[in-house]
Amino acid sequence: MNLARLPKVIEMLRSSDQVVRKQAALRLKALAENGLTAGECRLAFEAATEDWGHLKKIDMSRVLVVAAVTALESVAASAEMRNWFHFALTSLGRTELFPPRFATHEAFAESNMVSWLAFPTELARTPHEIELMATFPGATSDQRYYLFRFRTHEYDGWMAGLSGPFSVGASPAPAEGKATWSSFTAWDKKTPREHFEKLTEIRRHPE
């Protein structure tokens, strides 16, 4: 099935006719098996679940939409989409559908970092590459910071970014890091410890 037909599938998912929605679920699964991008999965997932609160007890065809394994992996694998996807499944009471290999403290911290970078007043895009370089303890024994380096094709070299602090005393789950940010300092300018200390110091005492 041609991926250009995704808009038609989304239109069908929004239909008030349950038979049409079931047909759309099967078509979406076929699309997923042929490879959907993370953005396409997000559009389809939003269309399929926008009325879930009213329909979840009677319209189980929508479970088929999020049960397409290829699509689930595609969304969760995207650092930009990962935390949003987990939040969406949590709101539906379907977190068991979230791929376990992406349900880690490190993966959720990465997604938080990428979401911050994509904000219009920051990097204004997702990085082309991002790597976890070190972790550091927070103010309490169950808190952790995650230090990343990232780069894009528009800029030369790697830059440092900090995500956190996050509680690691419970099961991994996405959260907003109150100190997540970057000053876009070149990675090679400092050691990981120096990056961490500078980023947290500036965050505590902004100029």
Image: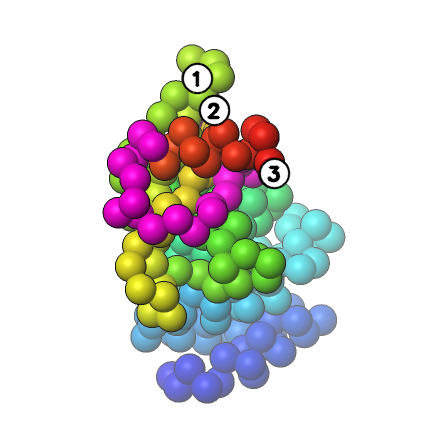
Q: Tell me where residue 122 sits by quadrant.
A: bottom right
Viewer-nearest residue: 100 or 12: 100
Q: Is residue 57 one of those drawn in magenta?
A: no
- The residue under label 2 is 167
Q: Residues within 10 Å of mark 2 (few under 14, many from 20)?
A: some
Residue 111 x %, y %: 44, 48
Could you tell me if residue 79 is visible in this image? yes
Q: Find residue 207 and name its label.
A: 3
Magenta stretch: give its range.
Answer: 168-194
Q: Could you give the CA–CA distance between mark 2 and mark 1, rounded to whole angstroms?
A: 5 Å
Q: Residues within 10 Å of mark 1 (few under 14, many from 20)?
A: few
Task: Please give the name of the residue rendered at 58% of the width and 30% of the height, measured from the top-left corner.
Answer: 205
Viewer-nearest residue: 26 or 33: 33
Q: Secondary structure at mark 3?
A: loop
N-term-proximal mark, 2 vs 1: 1
Q: Could you give the CA–CA distance between mark 3 and mark 2, rounded to whole angstroms?
A: 28 Å
Residue 103 x %, y %: 38, 39
Residue 175 x %, y %: 54, 36
Spot the residue most to the front.
207
Viewer-nearest residue: 101 or 80: 80
Q: Secondary structure at mark 1?
A: loop
Q: Is residue 138 above or below residue 100?
A: above
- The residue mark sitting in front, 3 or 1, is 3
- The residue under label 1 is 142
Q: Is residue 41 above or below residue 56?
A: below
> Which SS does the magenta portion mostly show?
loop
